[in-house]
Image (tube, rainbow, N blue to C red):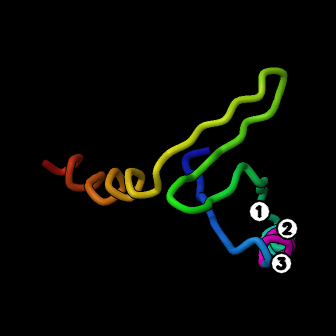
Amino acid sequence: SQSRALITTRPENASALAALIELRGVPARRIGTVGGRDLVVQVGGPTPREFTWEVSALYDAWDVALDSYLA
């Protein structure tokens, strides 16, 4: 598909959020956790991997993304 959304919530709200998403018929899955300064994405499968990004670096990349395409 053409787009994806990354949603974060407090751990105590995760089950309620998953139930709401399922109720709306939106395909979703948990891919990682946010804690402190990092986003950690865990990819399963035959060769499990883990990717980590600093949240501030992700914000900086998002903040200038549209400007870089219009420049």
Disc 2 and disc 1 in contact, CB within 8 angstroms: yes
Magenta-drawn segment: 13-19
Residue type highlighted by circle 2: Glu
Q: Residue tagged by mark 1?
A: 26
Q: Quadrant of the N terminus?
A: top right
The picture places residue 31, in percent across and down from the top left corner, at: 72, 49
| Secondary structure, magenta segment, majority class | helix
Query: For the view shown, which residue lies furthest in the left direction?
Result: 71
Disc 2 and disc 3 in contact, CB within 8 angstroms: no
Above or below, comparing residue 5 to residue 44 in the picture: below
Disc number for residue 9? none
Disc number for residue 22? 2
Q: Is residue 71 left or right of residue 18?
A: left
Closer to the chain start, of discs 3 and 1, is 3
Dot 2 crowding, Cα within 10 Å, few <14, some 14–19, many 20+:
few
CA–CA distance between discs 2 and 3? 10 Å
Residue type highlighted by circle 1: Val
Secondary structure at numbered mark 2: helix
The picture places residue 56, in percent across and down from the top left corner, at: 39, 57
- Residue at figure coordinates x 21%, y 48% from the top left: 68
Q: Residue tagged by mark 3?
A: 16
Depth check: 39 or 61 in front? 39
Secondary structure at numbered mark 3: helix
